[in-house]
Image (cartoon, grey):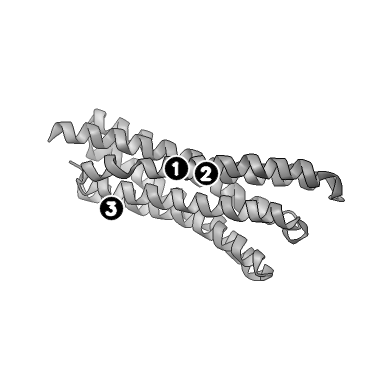
Amino acid sequence: MFEKELSETLIKYVSAVVNIVRHSREGIKMLEEFRSAEAMQYFANAIREDTEADEVRRGLLVKLQFLHPGFMRERISTLIRRLDLIAEQSKEVARNMTLFPYLELPGEIKDSVNELSERALEAALMVHELTYLLLNGDYSKVIEIAYKTEVAEEEADKTLVKARQLLVKYGVTLKNPAIVLMVDKLIESLEGITDFAEDASDYLRTLALYCRELK
């Protein structure tokens, strides 16, 4: 169903997107362990990975133009756009984490950030698995397990609500009011990763249903 060279490049792009999320997640873990220098390196790696992912994406679009007829080209292009959104949100997380004193945040808020980053990576890894299964023709498996990303998104949404409640609770104790806005943007970006991962998973399931009908 999918041409080999195109499949390999698509998997390479998905892997790069996952790496952006992973670097951001690892950076947050390093901050939790008071390893700030290492954390900043992970965030820098995430931003660099986004640049490299963009190069892979451009090559993928070129291959897509020449290797597939219109109906498949449009479907894979749509999937790429959804993956782009995951990458963009992940890059925003990395950028935000370099801009404010994370260690000064109340413990409960840091716990929420940590949980959101964990859910984000979980959802991104599921997108990678689903893409791999789709490209290898395991359509029934894609349809079977795509719901797991929705579960991660629902948990992330609950954590986002809790984190915003905590911002209200602790907002008056934070010396710099700009930090409240920055944390709110951070947690929204982290939750956004799971949102866009769920969208990508839903579309992968749609593609799996489509491809299974063609068999």
Check disc 2: other Cα within 10 Å, few if <14, some if 14-19, many if 20+: some
**At 48% across and 53% down in the image, what residue appears?**
121
x and y, in percent, of residue 149 in the image: 42, 44
**At 51% across and 50% down in the image, what residue appears?**
119
Residue 85 in view (yes/no): no
- Amino acid type, residue under disc 1 in the picture: Val
- Residue designated by label 3: 8
**At 31% across and 37% down in the image, what residue appears?**
205
Distance between the alpha carbons at the discs numbered 1 and 3: 28 Å
Of pointers 1 and 3, the one earlier in the residue sequence: 3
The C terminus sits in image quarter: top left
- Horizontal side of residue 73 vs 174, given as left or right: left
- Residue designated by label 2: 155
Of pointers 3 and 2, the one earlier in the residue sequence: 3
**At 46% across and 55% down in the image, what residue appears?**
52
Number of marks present in the image shown: 3
Q: Vertical placement of 47 versus 212: above or below?
A: below
- Amino acid type, residue under disc 2 in the picture: Glu
x and y, in percent, of residue 173 in the image: 85, 49
What secondary structure is found at the residue carrying circle 3? Answer: helix
- Horizontal side of residue 49 vs 64, given as left or right: right
Distance between the alpha carbons at the discs numbered 3 and 2: 32 Å
Check disc 1: other Cα within 10 Å, few if <14, some if 14-19, many if 20+: some
* Residue 98 lies in quadrant: bottom right
Q: Vertical placement of 12 versus 27: above or below?
A: above
x and y, in percent, of residue 192 in the image: 55, 40
- Amino acid type, residue under disc 3 in the picture: Glu
Dots 1 and 2: beta carbons under 8 Å? yes
Distance between the alpha carbons at the discs numbered 1 and 2: 6 Å
Which of discs 1 and 3 lies nearer the camera? The answer is: 1
Dots 1 and 3: beta carbons under 8 Å? no
Dots 3 and 2: beta carbons under 8 Å? no
